[in-house]
Amino acid sequence: MLILGIESSCDETAASVVKDCREILSSVISTQIEEHKKYGGVVPEIASRRHCENILGVVRKALDDAGITLNDLDGIAVTYAPGLIGALLVGVSFAKSLAMACGKPLIPVHHIAGHIAADYLTHKNLEPPFLCTVASGGHSNIIEVMSYTDFHVIGRTRDDAAGECFDKCARAMGFPYPGGVHIDNAARNGDASKYKLPHPTVAENEFDFSFSGLKTSVINMIHNSSQKGISLDTNDLSAGIQTAISDIITEKTINAAKAYGYKKIALAGGVSANTGVREALSAACVKNGFEFYMPEKSLCGDNGAMIACQGSYNFLAGITADESLNAAASLSIEKSFK
Ligand code: KG4
Ligand code: ZN
């Protein structure tokens, strides 16, 4: 079975061919980061325009690199939600037209389900059920992965997502967009205990995430210091932020696993590339006797292979779309394939 996966939900135009669910035959990613960097974040209209320019070339290269033609495909999978609406619409319109032109099934894929599938590509033995924490630029979720296509969200973002918190703190520290990776690098040479940072909790649901208190306290600390003419140590502050985010993600994931009876834990999403988060959750899983899975670093951020992989499982479960498929800026993973 050969599935083409197309991803255009944010600032990466990506396409990939995956064979029999988990074997990546090609993966092409055209990133727009350099252009959005100038504005300190993603500019939605620019993102849509670049997707429009790049998508055909990216898909053509994915097919060429895999050594196949459109005729060889069993289906065309596309991210249809959630994300920037104008960006999603480029991928959805393109995938629909391609599916119609070559008479292949169109397979809708939820972006968060795609991130989870990055773990299937990395760990050939991983099968549901398991508990997965997905932390990206727009989402922080703790999800019960009951089957390849059934999900139950037990914790969600109340305000800023983990990646957003990394990026906003990084921006306040003067790092370029996207700042998460710069905090990761600076934290290697920092002392996390130097600055005291809050570990916000959410009273109503202990598994929900709230990172805006942490972000605000970092931004206030930076402003207060600059008003007093005191310079903060960027490495130490980075280490403090990374440790706070890693602790929050680890504590909530482990508590959720215990509460819901899971012994198999996975991590996914752009933030799963973070050294501190990887180490903290991995160590906590060892301590609690849980199996732990995380994507290889190249599959943590947005890519087409994760969409092709999840698309393969959707296809096997009979989840396909007709020509009325539309994009959605926000949509719960629980409702995605209903
Ligand atoms: O999943 P993703 O590529 O896009 C979304 O679906 O949002 O996640 C992007 C997020 C950004 O906020 C980025 O700063 C963060 O993932 N990120 C990191 C690291 N690499 C990417 N955050 C912390 N440390 C990293 N090494
Ligand atoms: Zn993503």
Image (cartoon, rainbow, N blue to C red):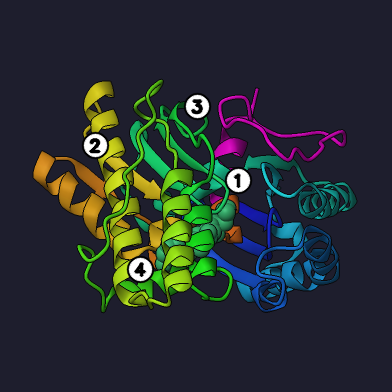
> In the rendered image, which residue does mark 1 sit on?
111
User: Which callout, 2 or 3, points at the residue further toward the start of the chain?
Assistant: 3
The residue tagged with tag 2: helix, strand or loop? Answer: helix
Residue type, mark 3 in image: Asp
Q: Mark number for residue 150?
A: 3
Residue where numbered disc 4 is placed: 238
Task: Answer whether labels 3 and 4 touch (C-beta < 8 Å).
Answer: no
Q: Nearer the viewer, residue 262 or 103?
A: 262
**x and y percentages locating residue 112 in the rendered image:** 55, 43
Q: Residue 281 placed where, x, y %? A: 25, 50
What secondary structure is the stretch in magenta mostly built from? loop
Circles 1, 3 touching at the beta carbon (< 8 Å)? no
Give yes or no for residue 328 being in the magenta stretch: yes
- Local crowd size for mark 3, using a 10 Å CA cut-off: few (<14), some (14–19), many (≥20): some
Kindly identify the amino acid type of the residue bearing the numbered disc 4. Ser
The amino acid at mark 1 is His
- The residue carrying mark 2 is 254
Q: Secondary structure at mark 1?
A: helix
Magenta-tinted stretch: 309-338
- Closer to us: 337 or 62: 337
Badge 4 density bin: few <14, some 14–19, many ≥20, Cα 10 Å: many
